[in-house]
Image (tube, helix red, strand yellow):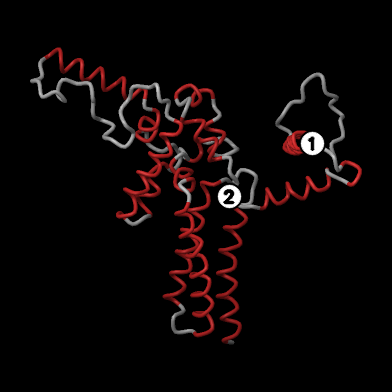
Amino acid sequence: MAQTFRQVLYNTLLTNIDNTLMATQSSTATLENCLPAMDYLLGVFEEAKVKYRDDPFMASRVNSAWSKLDKYYTKTNDSTAYIAALVLDPRMKWEYITSTWQPEWIPDAKALVAKLWKKYHPTSDPTSDPTSDPNSDPNSDLTNKRPLNAFTTWKQQKSGRRADHTDEYFRYIREPPIPHDHIKQGGACSWWLEERQQRLYPNLSKMALDILTVPAMSAAPERLFSSAKITISDRRNRLHSDTTEAIECLKSWRKIQTIRLESGLESGLELD
């Protein structure tokens, strides 16, 4: 009876792990899914540590799994991309992090994302530093300690609107997260590829697409290496890297069937 009960508990934990893995293995599951998946599983194991602390069989296994997951969760600190991916998901933004993380972790995380944004922020744009208060107006007379009057107040308001218009990152994060059902099939990337986002956030959209096209798991890149090995056969061992890349892109596009071939190519071209 005890063995059956333990097996049920064990299978429950394995089901939670399997469900999480399946959700992060799809073609649309990209980097923004990594931290939420780890947060969820860490929560599952932390509850299990308390629930099964008096069961030597379960406790040892739960503690071992929690320790391994926590090790890899800590390694995500080595790259800003994990945090930026969450922030650049219009369904999440900073709300997910502020509601999940410890408060003392958040200022450093915001500084890292602002530093990454500087690499995409146009240097010729005379806006304020992204790490400063986005509501401040560096060109206002208030900065120069002059008393405000009707004109200077009007000028400050206009300058504030201009800064708000030009700083894409702060304008983006000030907007509330959008509902999940407003995202088309394809995840956060599909939202950033929309014409409206491309027009409103020309530089931030580049940063978002650079980060949000990174797959959440390594399964897809591993399959690509296997596919490339088939492409570069013994009789094709002198294929140039550019040619190999083009062939693999065509094979991938043919599978997802969302890319139209140009008229100069035959639609019945065999790529396998």
Residue drawn at 46 percent across, 58 percent down: 39
Q: Position of residue 248 (x, y in %)?
A: 76, 38
For badge 1, the amino acid type reads His
Q: Position of residue 270 (x, y in %)?
A: 87, 34
Q: Residues within 10 Å of mark 1 (few under 14, many from 20)?
A: few
The answer to whether residue 212 is left or right of residue 155 is: right
The answer to whether residue 240 is left or right of residue 202 is: right
Q: Residue furthest left?
A: 147
The answer to whether residue 238 is left or right of residue 155 is: right
The answer to whether residue 96 is left or right of residue 158 is: right
**Marking on residue 230:** none
Q: Residue furthest front?
A: 238
What residue did someone put label 2 on?
Answer: 216
Q: Residue furthest right?
A: 235
Along the line of sight, which residue is nearer the eye, 95 or 207?
Answer: 207
Residue drawn at 80 percent across, 48 percent down: 229
Query: Hey, which quadrant is residue 210 in on the image?
Result: top right
Q: Position of residue 162 (x, y in %)?
A: 31, 19
Residue drawn at 16 percent across, 25 percent down: 143
Q: Is residue 53 above or below residue 250?
A: below
Labels 2 & 1 near each other (Cβ < 8 A) = no
Figure quadrant of the C terminus: top right
Secondary structure beneath disc 1? loop
Q: Residues within 10 Å of mark 2 (few under 14, many from 20)?
A: many
Q: Position of residue 99 (x, y in %)?
A: 35, 51
What residue did someone put label 1 on?
Answer: 240
For badge 2, the amino acid type reads Ala
Whole-number angstrom distance, CA of label 2 to CA of label 1? 29 Å
Identify the mark nearer the N-term, 2 or 1.
2
